[in-house]
Image: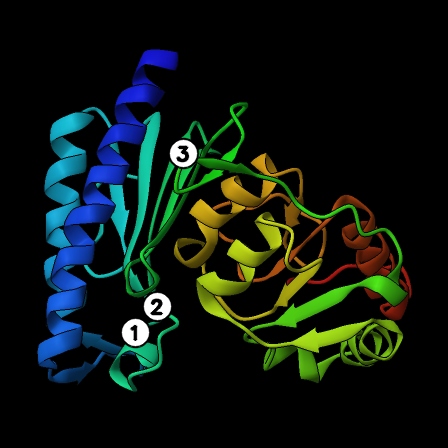
Amino acid sequence: MSDILDKALGAAREAAGAAAEIILHYWRTGVDVVVKGDDTPVTVADREAEMAIRGILAAALPEAGIYGEEYGADDISREWLWLVDPLDGTKSFVRRTPFFSTQIALMHRGELVLGVSSAPLYDERMWAVRGRGAFLDGQRVQVASTAAMRDASISTGNVKSLTADARWDALGAMIRDSNRIRGYGDFCHYHLLARGGLDLVIESDLNILDVAALAVIVREAGGVFTDLDGNAPDLRTRSVLAGTPAMHAQALERFRASLGGATIGG
């Protein structure tokens, strides 16, 4: 498996670089926006970047399936499965807000084992392989040692659905008890978490393609990455609770207590 992961990491990094060239071209020149059936925007940058990524990944690991944001899944039942979001943060991209990235992850028998997260406008790329640590542009990174809520920096992303249940009050209490609150969103707060700049990230409305690569990176940096119910990420994941080990444990306990000890889908 080691040889396969070496080959896969090289391909994923190459694919992220190819996508970056396409995305930055359209960032400079501008693009028309099409609204998809789910009311989310898509651009030629999304589609061209995914096609470039697919070509590189398929050539490097032909036995793997590919599940992409724009062109769907060719076969999710294979032993190896690529998860690709060529332009995560399209809404930011079209509004000229610099919080967008390319996300490429690899699953083996349902477990996330590799992730590459590329933020081309920042010239920043993180990657991780299971058991090998997490890296930012070649330098190993580690989550902070923060263990008390009073010292924690918390970042929230998409939390609209969280406002509808008791966990919203639990989040409010954590914010009151914390050191500071931010809302970086998209790739940005996960990169900061993995490199020790944040301690807890909370999101209730996303899909696995948004965060699969980031899950590997945060875990390999020493953090804990689950959904809001404490479940490991899989193809059904719709929420995230990620943090230093101590902060994740405390936040999960508070969320569970707010629901009376029960769990519901994130």
Which one is closest to the eye, mark 1 or mark 2?
Answer: 2
Q: Which SS class for mark 2?
A: loop
Up-down: is 12 above or below 35? above
Instruction: Count the numbered circles shown.
Output: 3
Which residue position is annotated with label 2? 100
Type of amino acid at the residue the image marks with label 2: Phe
Residue at horizontal 80%, vertical 52%? 146
Q: Distance between the residues labelled 3 and 2?
A: 23 Å
Label 1 crowd bin: few (<14), some (14–19), many (20+), radius 10 Å: many
Tell me the quarter of the picture where residue 25 sits.
bottom left
Q: Which SS class for mark 3?
A: strand
Residue 240 in the image: x percent, y percent?
61, 59
Q: Tell me if label 1 and label 3 are in contact, CB under 8 Å.
A: no
Q: Tell me if label 1 and label 2 are in contact, CB under 8 Å.
A: yes
Which one is closest to the eye, mark 1 or mark 3?
Answer: 1
Type of amino acid at the residue the image marks with label 3: Met
Up-down: is 42 above or below 71? below
Residue 178 in the image: x percent, y percent?
83, 71
Which residue position is annotated with label 1? 90
Q: Tell me if label 3 and label 2 are in contact, CB under 8 Å.
A: no
Q: Which colour scheme is used?
A: rainbow
Residue 223 in the image: x percent, y percent?
67, 43
Q: Is residue 217 left or right of residue 210?
A: right
Residue at horizontal 59%, vertical 82%? 160
Residue at horizontal 65%, vertical 51%? 196
Q: Distance between the residues labelled 1 and 2?
A: 7 Å
Residue at horizontal 18%, vertical 64%? 23
Q: Is residue 83 left or right of residue 201?
A: left
Which residue position is annotated with label 3? 107
